[in-house]
Structures are given as structure tokens and as C-alpha cells.
């Protein structure tokens, strides 16, 4: 088990085919830009991924915070809570996730993370997440999109 963040990853590092599919899709819609925008992303193109995706708006405060705009149905079941319309810091189990995401905002660099499932669960012991930046102007990260793979 990996326990930590990887920024220099290849799709072989991912624990799920869905993460590989999201990454390939992100690269496709990114094209020659530094980052794709939310308007480039069409949920119709990735329907089988939606239940494991969560998206967060970047809130430029001091410190940077994150507002959850979408929380997939598999995540609602696993975390026993719908995160939509909450802020990431409203959850007790995020650990250093906010620091990883702030780093993504500053570096504009995607990351892959794998670790222990953050809440007590009979169903899941580990999880991994691929988190990617989105930008409406190609310079500033507005939104993040992540696919979470849950593992028994």
C-alpha cells in the first residue's frame, strides 16, 4: 500500500481503470492548454465515472478553502454523508487533504494519493484519489475534479 501523495505519476500508478479513464479524458479536453476548464468537461462523456467523482470550487480566501460542488453517489454511501454544498473543512476526516489541494492550486499540478480509508468502515480499508485542476482562464485553478477509488 502506498501511503501518501504522488505528483510525478503515470496511469500505471492508479488503483482503478476509472482513474485511468478520467485522466485520459482530462488530457483530451486539456489539449494544448495548461488546464481544461469546467466548460470543456461534459458529464455525458464520462457517465460511468460520475458516481465516484467529487468536484470542489476553489475559494480564494486566506487560507484557500474548498466548497464541494458535486459528491458522487458512491461517495455519499461510503462516507455516509452527502458533501454537496458543504466546505471541505466542515468534515472532520479530511486530514491533510486541504494541504494537498492547496498545493495543487499553487502548483497547478495534478496529484494521486493512496492511503487508509479516513473513517471507520466495515466495507473499506483503503482509498485512492486522482485530483486534477480545472481553470476558466488557463492560469488560475477554479475547480478541482477527483475520482475516488474505494478498496475493501
Image: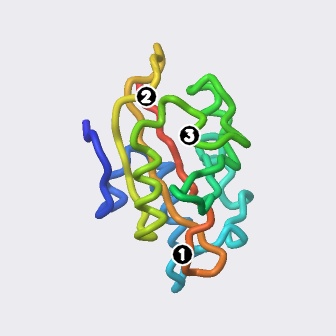
- Residue linked to disc 1: 35
Residue 101 in the image: state x and y as whole percent.
46, 54
Front-lying residue, 118 or 27: 118
Is 55 placed left or right of 98 in the picture?
A: right
User: Could you tell me residue 115's position as x and y percent?
Assistant: 34, 36
Pointer 3 or 2: first along the chain: 3
| Quadrant occupied by the N terminus | top left
- Decide: few, some or many residues near mark 3? Use Cα within 10 Å; few <14, some 14-19, many ≥20: some
| Image location of residue 17, percent across then percent down | 46, 49
Q: Are marks 1 and 3 in contact (CB under 8 Å)?
A: no
Q: Residue tagged by mark 2?
A: 118
The secondary structure type at the circle numbered 3 is: helix
Q: Residues within 10 Å of mark 1 (few under 14, many from 20)?
A: many
Q: Is residue 116 left or right of residue 94?
A: left
Q: CA distance from mark 2 to mark 1?
A: 29 Å
Name the residue at the top extreme.
Answer: 122
Q: How many neighbours does mark 2 have within 10 angstroms: few (below 14), some (14-19), or many (20 or more)?
A: some
Of helix, strand and loop, which one carries label 1? loop
Q: Separation of disc 1 and disc 3 at Cα?
A: 25 Å
Amino acid at each position: 500500500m502506498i501511503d501518501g501523495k504522488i505528483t510525478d505519476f503515470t496511469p500505471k500508478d492508479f488503483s482503478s481503470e476509472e482513474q485511468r479513464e478520467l485522466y485520459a479524458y482530462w488530457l483530451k479536453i486539456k489539449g494544448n492548454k495548461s488546464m481544461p476548464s469546467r466548460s470543456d468537461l461534459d458529464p455525458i462523456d464520462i457517465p460511468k465515472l460520475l458516481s465516484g467523482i467529487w468536484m470542489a470550487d476553489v475559494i480564494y480566501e486566506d487560507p484557500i478553502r474548498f466548497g464541494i460542488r458535486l459528491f458522487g453517489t458512491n461517495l455519499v454511501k461510503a462516507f455516509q454523508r452527502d458533501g454537496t454544498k458543504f466546505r471541505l473543512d466542515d468534515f472532520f476526516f479530511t486530514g491533510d487533504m486541504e494541504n494537498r489541494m492547496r498545493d495543487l492550486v499553487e502548483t497547478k499540478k495534478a496529484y494521486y494519493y493512496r492511503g487508509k480509508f479516513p473513517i471507520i468502515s466495515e466495507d473499506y480499508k483503503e482509498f485512492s484519489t486522482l485530483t486534477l485542476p480545472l481553470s476558466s482562464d488557463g492560469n488560475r485553478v477554479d475547480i478541482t475534479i477527483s475520482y475516488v477509488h474505494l478498496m475493501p
